[in-house]
Image (cartoon, rainbow, N blue to C red):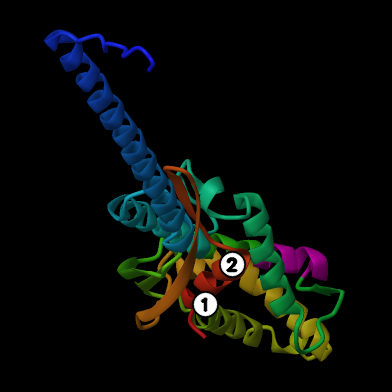
Amino acid sequence: MPEETKAKTKSRVAKYWGGAQQTFAQRYRGIIVTIAVVVMVAVVGFAVARIGLNYDGVSQASRQKLAKKDANIALQFGLTGQTSAPEVNQVVTLSQVAWQKEITNSVQQALNHGDEVADQVTFDGKNYQKAQVMTALSQHYMATLQQNRHYQIDEITYDRYHNATVTYTVVPINLPEAQKKVQDFVTGELNKKADDVQKLSAPQLRLVSYAMVSDNWDNILKNQLPTAKPVQAKMKLLYASRWQSAQYQVAKDTLNHILNTGLAE
């Protein structure tokens, strides 16, 4: 028969620490598992919020404040072709020089569209060149457009991607009425020289008329521009952001839309 071995009796302290170590190990493993689950849930939750809900660390209150500020920049820039805001390059896709050139070219195209205008004519001791007359007249139009116009932002709404739709009201400049006012004066002056006018062809008369409108634009209007009834319109602000940093932008098409709403038909 094998000799019976005698188990060594553990002290109460040893038994306690042995049990305590086992309990601590179990708790430690439990804490690690819990932390891992929490981290995984946080990562998944952040991914869902970032991708699914388009969360970018910017509060809605901050976006609302930003949208209102950038909407004012876009409206002032679109209506007048200029702004004093230092952030303008972040909001619009064109420089002030480029946008003013766009407006001037648009005015010149409108002036050249329609009935024929002579390339040059001499009238009442003055020689008029079409290119120079059209450039001068478009510059008067541009200066007129650059005068401040009354507008107000009525409402800003947002889609799920934080793009903003801005509803605004603007009092348009009535350029047709302004031109008619100057043209009426020019017609009166031409009537005083009816004999000389009769010697002109229709294209030559149009060039003389344009030239005299340009020459008398400022002193007839005297910065008192006729306006039309207020109109309400909407524009889109496109949202762009990096983490905890955001901005709104407008495209050239939106600037054209703003400009057109600020002018009477």
- Give coordinates of residue 239: x percent, y percent: 48, 58
- What number is the disc on residue 141? 2
Please indicate whether residue 191 sits to the left or right of residue 165 in the image: right
Could you tell me the amino acid type at mark 1? Leu
Q: What stretch is highlighted in magenta?
A: 125-138
**Res 24 quadrant in image:** top left
- Give coordinates of residue 180: x percent, y percent: 54, 83
Q: Is residue 232 visible?
A: yes
Gap in Å between the C-alphas at discs 2 and 1? 8 Å
- Give coordinates of residue 227: x percent, y percent: 40, 77
Compared to 114, does 100 lie above or below? above
In-front residue for pair 180/191: 180
Query: In the rendered view of the protein, which quadrant contains the N terminus?
Result: top left
- What number is the disc on residue 175? 1
Compared to 220, does 191 lie above or below? below
**Res 179 quadrant in image:** bottom right
Residue name at image x 31 percent, y 14 percent: 4
